[in-house]
Amino acid sequence: MAVIGHFVDGKPLPGSSGRHGDVFDPATGRRTARVELASAADVAVAVEAAARAARLWRDASLARRTAVLFAFRELVHARRDRLAEVITAEHGKVLADAAGEVQRGLEIIEYACGIPSALRGGFSENVSAEVDSYTLRQPLGVVAVITPFNFPAMVPLWFLPIAVACGNAVVLKPSEKDPSPALLLAEWFTEAGLPDGVLNVVNGDVGAVDALLEHPGVKAVSFVGSTPVARYVHQRGTAAGKRVQALGGAKNHMVVLPDADLDLAADAAVNAGFGSAGERCMAISALVAVEPVADALVARIAELMGRLRTGDGRRGCDMGPLVTAAHAARVRSYVEAGVAAGAVPVVDGRDVEPDGDAAGFWLGPTLFDHVTPDMSIYTDEIFGPVLGVVRVGSYDEAVELVNANPYGNGTAIFTNDGGAARRYQHEVEVGMVGVNVPIPVPMAYYSFGGWKASLFGDLHAHGEDGVRFFTRGKVVTSRWRGPRRGGVDLGFPTQT
């Protein structure tokens, strides 16, 4: 049985805790590895290595940093199929979905390659007599990144390239359910020329999270996970004097107006509801049908769902298993609760016959109609392939429903009325909005993040907010009297 350890100071590092977790192949149900769970001492070793590296890396020129990022981009691009295979083996999502995850991660790396532009400050000449003022953005030092199981490559890549490009050193704690993609990324970053200690990976559970939140050498924490844990991380991290961005859970609504193209809306509902087995913080889990379209829309969605093939992600199936047996059982319990509450199970995923090992963690796509806002399948983030249809009588009722929800991560509206779409994007209290786009995940040069209970902290992930989060601003006011003289140098000037 393989043992997965940590990666510290540029090399693999065995842990000292003696504690391990299990890593499974979700499509077969078989345990494939044991992962070491870091102790506080292991975390301290990683933070110390990062602190030593940060003192040197912060002074590296922007040209050197971007050279490393370009080299890293080329390695990830050349080995994208390998990375996708590892994601599928440990998470279970189908290969095509894993490849899409890698592509979105590559886009963040490419954004970080432009860090010289993103870090440019402002300059004002002669704010007073012979006095100039200008701004700088400087790295924080050691930062921690804590990421979830559902995107074991993309979510780390939301943060790592920008944090490193800004001159910080990083301690990454990936999910212990699927740790191998993060370790591959760390090894490839080192191969690309990143100095030892600038990127470290410690595997672990809540003990490792607490150790990172408590360690005085960690200056900032980026976290992605469920809302209760995000709230905990934010409260505990800020109490310890750290800068924290904690992205939490979601209950994403897709509103379909009567004038919408129902074929397009049905396709979108299936794609956004069941991709990655619904294990996406941007998955559509609540479809709000504005009457009189519900009957026709539910029928079209059910027809499309009948064509989906659930099974091993390496066999060309449409949807894979859930990540663990415990998570599959949890999602199944929500299906049972929905039936008991009176929702109508149009398609029941408990009856699925998967194209895969019978011991895999299976639950097929599930569609409920006549869901009401008091049911647990509506109020809770299920994080599985369960789509509930809520019927409303008007646009205003749909907006009221969405805005009353405690989450504010993502939403979508499907309509052919530009005025209605513009009104919705203005009125809805949600951080990311799609118009005829079911999963409105921003591109790398914009920032990702929700509102309300979906985000704790002021700054979102990647884009301009990411650069601001991983740097501190400084304003310099200077006065120099008289000309400054230098020697003769006929060499061609460079930025290095």
Image: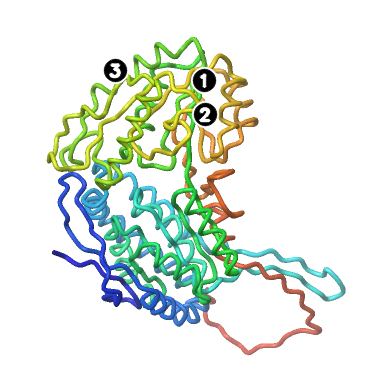
Residue 50: name its quadrant.
Answer: bottom left
Q: What is the crowding at mark 1: few (fewer than 14 residues within 10 Å), some, or many (at least 20)?
A: many
Give the numbered dot on residue 415.
1
Q: Is residue 123 visible?
A: yes
Give the numbered dot on residue 435.
2
Measured in 3D between alpha carbons, the distance from the residue under mark 2 to the one under mark 3, in whole angstroms, is 24 Å
Which label lies toward us, 3 or 1?
3
Residue in view at x 54 percent, y 63 percent: 236
Residue in view at x 58 percent, y 15 percent: 394
Which label lies toward us, 2 or 3?
3
- Marks 3 and 2: in contact by CB < 8 Å? no
Of 10 and 214, nearer the camera is: 214
The kind of secondary structure element at disc 2 is strand
Q: Is residue 421 above or below residue 88?
A: above
Closer to the N terminus: mark 3 or mark 1? 3
Residue that protrudes farthest toward the right in the picture = 129
The residue indicated by pointer 3 is 303
